[in-house]
Image (cartoon, helix red, strand yellow):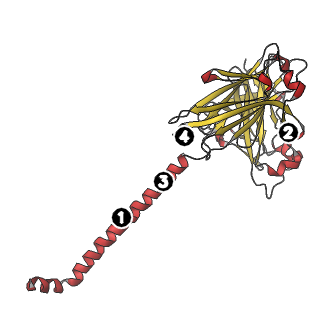
């Protein structure tokens, strides 16, 4: 025993260094493992972000949708989807079931898009007209005005988790609404999730008879309320019409940037449009198709105006309306007065629409 102790004393420094090295290795390994665990927890939290509840006709502020209707001889149906992901980006979705209620109210819009539910004679006057909402998966419907009610709530609706899923509702507007004397009625929708981490979605849906030619597409900037303009982070731009072909729209990239989810949506097909002049001094239009994201290469700059253009393939038999978000580049230093924004996002004209032969 004494001999062992004497040997340990001779090599004490070496033994101490070995013990210190082992301790440092354990501490370092534990620290690395801890950092990995934390990183995984952060990623997991992001996958369950509170934006994974959305709709094509509602959002977390207030979305106003005017659906163009081509046939004024029959009642108009408008489909409204509710998603368990951030529409239209399906790659990230909720793992859990999404439970929620939907309340629908029929009414009218006043100044500054203020909504008021129908009451009195207008509400009782709905008798004989077909204004209703249907939850398709349960085949449950409510006709507005029934029992003198302007509102109805679909309780305890759900969307399955584990994949990109949706729930479908259908709004029906009486053909009178798109006839020669529309009443100007609209429906306000509010989707309230049971999970309070998710946003409450709201939207107002109207219909309008689109007196277009047999084919035609156009793009318009949503009307801007100038007194509230400073509150906006961006703008809604609508493409809508009838027929199959190509539609070109433009914006100024110095002031606004397009929603990348729209560019990366695989349901959309884009083209770059090039105009040249032949030997007979005639304009020749050519297109190069991009249907696999990303499609930034499809953007065509105009050095004269400073605008860039993008051409989208449209087919009203599949989709007759697109809503595109554009965001301000720098609201603190750049000018976003209403008159200027209309130049940053100009409406499309007849020359921007090319029907397929």
The crowd level at tag 4 (other Cα within 10 Å; few <14, some 14-19, many 20+) is: many
Q: Of callouts 1 and 3, which one flags the residue occurring earlier in the amino acid sequence? A: 1
Tag 1 and tag 3, C-beta contact below 8 Å: no
Q: Of callouts 2 and 3, which one flags the residue occurring earlier in the amino acid sequence? A: 3
Q: Can you name the residue that lies furthest to the top here?
A: 73
**Occupied quadrant, residue 348:** top right
Which residue is tagged 1? 29
**Occupied quadrant, residue 252:** top right
Tag 4 and tag 1, C-beta contact below 8 Å: no
Name the quadrant of the C terminus.
Answer: top right
Tag 2 and tag 3, C-beta contact below 8 Å: no
Q: Where is residue 261 in the image (x, y as percent from the top left)?
A: 64, 40
Is residue 147 something one can see in this rendering? Answer: yes
Which residue is tagged 4? 94
Q: Nearer the viewer, residue 173 or 277?
A: 173
Q: In the picture shown, does residue 15 fall above or below 315?
A: below
The crowd level at tag 3 (other Cα within 10 Å; few <14, some 14-19, many 20+) is: few
Camera-side mark, 1 or 2: 2
- Tag 1 secondary structure: helix
Q: Position of residue 293 (x, y in %)?
A: 59, 37
**How far is disc 2 from disc 3 in space, using C-alphas?**
43 Å
Camera-side mark, 2 or 3: 2
Tally of numbered tags = 4
């Amino acid at each position: 025993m004494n001999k062992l102790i004497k040997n340990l004393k001779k090599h004490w420094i070496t033994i101490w260094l070995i013990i210190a090295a082992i301790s440092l290795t354990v501490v370092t390994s534990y620290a690395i493992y801890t950092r990995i665990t934390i990183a995984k927890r952060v990623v997991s939290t992001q996958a369950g972000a509170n934006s994974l509840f959305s709709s094509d006709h509602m959002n977390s502020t207030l979305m106003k949708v005017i659906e163009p209707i081509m046939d004024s001889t029959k009642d108009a149906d408008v489909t409204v989807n509710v998603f368990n992901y951030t529409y239209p980006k399906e790659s990230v979705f909720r793992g859990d079931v999404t439970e929620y209620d939907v309340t629908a109210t029929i009414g009218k819009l006043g100044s500054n898009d203020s909504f008021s539910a129908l009451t009195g004679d207008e509400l009782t006057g709905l008798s004989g007209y077909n204004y209703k909402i249907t939850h398709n998966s349960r085949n449950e419907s409510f006709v507005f005005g029934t029992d003198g009610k302007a509102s109805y709530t679909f309780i305890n609706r759900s969307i399955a988790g584990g994949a990109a899923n949706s729930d479908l509702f259908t709004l029906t507007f009486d053909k009178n609404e798109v006839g020669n004397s529309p009443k100007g009625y609209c429906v306000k929708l509010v989707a309230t999730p049971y999970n309070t981490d998710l946003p409450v979605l709201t939207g107002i849906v109207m219909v309008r008879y689109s007196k277009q030619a047999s084919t035609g597409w156009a793009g318009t900037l949503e009307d801007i309320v100038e007194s509230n303009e400073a509150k906006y982070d961006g703008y809604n731009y609508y493409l809508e019409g009838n027929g199959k072909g190509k539609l070109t729209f433009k914006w100024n990239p110095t002031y606004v940037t397009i929603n990348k989810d729209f560019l990366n949506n695989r349901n959309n097909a884009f083209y770059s449009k090039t105009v040249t002049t032949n030997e007979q001094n005639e304009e020749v239009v050519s297109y190069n198709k991009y249907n696999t994201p990303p499609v930034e290469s499809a953007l065509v700059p105009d050095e004269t105006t400073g605008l860039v253009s993008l051409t989208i393939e449209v087919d009203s038999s599949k989709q007759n309306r697109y809503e595109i978000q554009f965001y301000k580049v720098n609201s603190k230093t750049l000018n976003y007065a209403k008159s200027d924004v209309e130049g940053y996002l100009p409406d499309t004209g007849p020359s921007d629409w090319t029907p397929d032969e």
